[in-house]
Image (tube, rainbow, N blue to C red):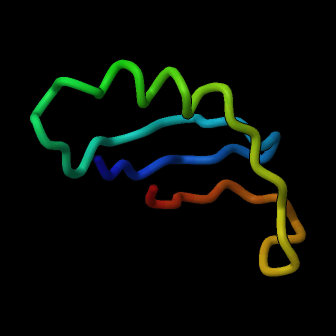
Amino acid sequence: MTATVGIGSNGEMVGYQITNCFPKGVFDYQAVAALKKWRWQATAANENKGASADQY
């Protein structure tokens, strides 16, 4: 499964899009539930803690 995730300035997921999944639709709910629990920290490349989009 591959998903594009939007990350807000507080480090929480603010949106997502499933870009690839096999078998289609089987693991979507569980993957998104896990991503909602993750927290991201700003790096030196994003010190102003602006919103970001990453692919996982």
Q: Residue at x 29, y 27 (%)?
A: 28
**Count of numbered circles on the image:** 0
The relative height of residue 5 versus residue 47 in the rendered view (above or below) is above
Image quadrant in which the C terminus is located: bottom left
Question: Residue 33: horizontal and vertical position, in percent?
Answer: 50, 21
Q: Residue at x 78, y 47 (%)?
A: 9
Q: Where on the picture, by quarter, is residue 16?
A: top left
Question: Residue 14: horizontal and vertical position, in percent?
Answer: 58, 35
Q: Where on the picture, by quarter, is residue 49?
A: bottom right
Question: Residue 19: horizontal and vertical position, in percent?
Answer: 24, 50
47 sits to left or right of 33: right
Q: Residue at x 69, y 44 (%)?
A: 8
Question: Residue 36: horizontal and vertical position, in percent?
Answer: 59, 27
Q: Where on the picture, by quarter, is residue 10?
A: top right
10 sits to left or right of 1: right
Q: Residue at x 87, y 66 (%)?
A: 48
28 sits to left or right of 31: left
4 sits to left or right of 54: left
- Of 43 and 14, which appears nearest the observer? 43
The relative height of residue 41 versus residue 23 in the rendered view (above or below) is below
